[in-house]
Amino acid sequence: MRPKVETTCYSYFNICSEGEIQYGKGLVAAENGVFNPDDVTELLGTEPHWKWRAGDPRKDGASTYGFSSWSACRQDTPVDDAHEQCLAIARILKDKIPALQQIKREYNVSLQLVIVPVIFNEKPPVLFFDKEIIDFCHATGAEIGIDTYVCDREPWLRMLFCRLRKYRR
């Protein structure tokens, strides 16, 4: 008997250089879009789960990042409820709104609340944004991004997806 594959979802907060996609280079930071992620960590007092600065080598070692990025506050539970995950992120960062506003003023960056549902067997997660989440996004100028993956029923695809996600970072 094959193991049952369930829909999962995780969410996180991201600060990323604004820029443009250039052929053969990917995202290249706009003027004043490059920032030091360590400065963001210090200002917010929150450790990121991943970060890089424009010019840092990519994991493949063949190229460098053309933009800066800082991501934190990853929420993995409840696995089927993006609303609860986003609410947790908004509450973690609520007292850091002035610092987030400062970052937006100083650098040409985007702030995003990112939701990543991985849908198996056509069962989507709960996707709902209440007033508290909307107020947080409004106060910080953050956008809400949904990076959706719809997968086949086969468990081996889930394993492949997880390996590809690790490689992309």
Image: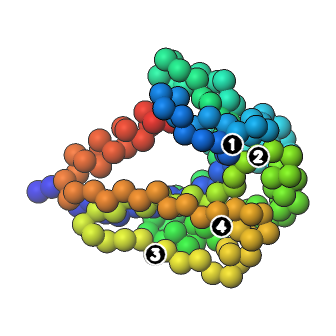
For the point 81% across and 44% down, which residue is it? 107
For the point 69% across and 31% down, which residue is it? 53
Task: State the mark number for residue 108.
Answer: 2
Q: CA distance from mark 2 to mark 4?
A: 26 Å
CB under 8 Å between discs 2 and 1 = yes
Q: Amino acid at mark 4?
A: Ala
Q: CA distance from mark 3 to mark 4?
A: 15 Å
User: Can residue 45 be seen at all in this image of the molecule?
Assistant: no
Image coordinates of residue 62 in percent, x first then y, are: 49, 17
Task: State the mark number for residue 82.
Answer: none
- Closer to the N terminus: mark 2 or mark 1? 1
Q: CA distance from mark 4 to mark 1?
A: 24 Å
Image coordinates of residue 114 in percent, x first then y, are: 57, 58
Which residue is identified by label 1?
17
Q: Amino acid at mark 2?
A: Asn
Q: Amino acid at mark 1?
A: Ser
Query: Relative to 45, does residue 169 appear above or below in the rendering?
Result: above
Task: State the mark number for residue 126.
Answer: 3
Depth-wise, is mark 2 or mark 4 nearer the camera? 2
For the point 58% across and 23% down, which residue is it? 64
Query: Relative to 155, does residue 98 appear above or below in the rendering?
Result: below
Q: Residues within 10 Å of mark 1 (few under 14, many from 20)?
A: many
Q: Secondary structure at mark 1?
A: strand
Q: Secondary structure at mark 3?
A: loop
Which residue is identified by label 4?
88
Depth-wise, is mark 3 or mark 4 nearer the camera? 3
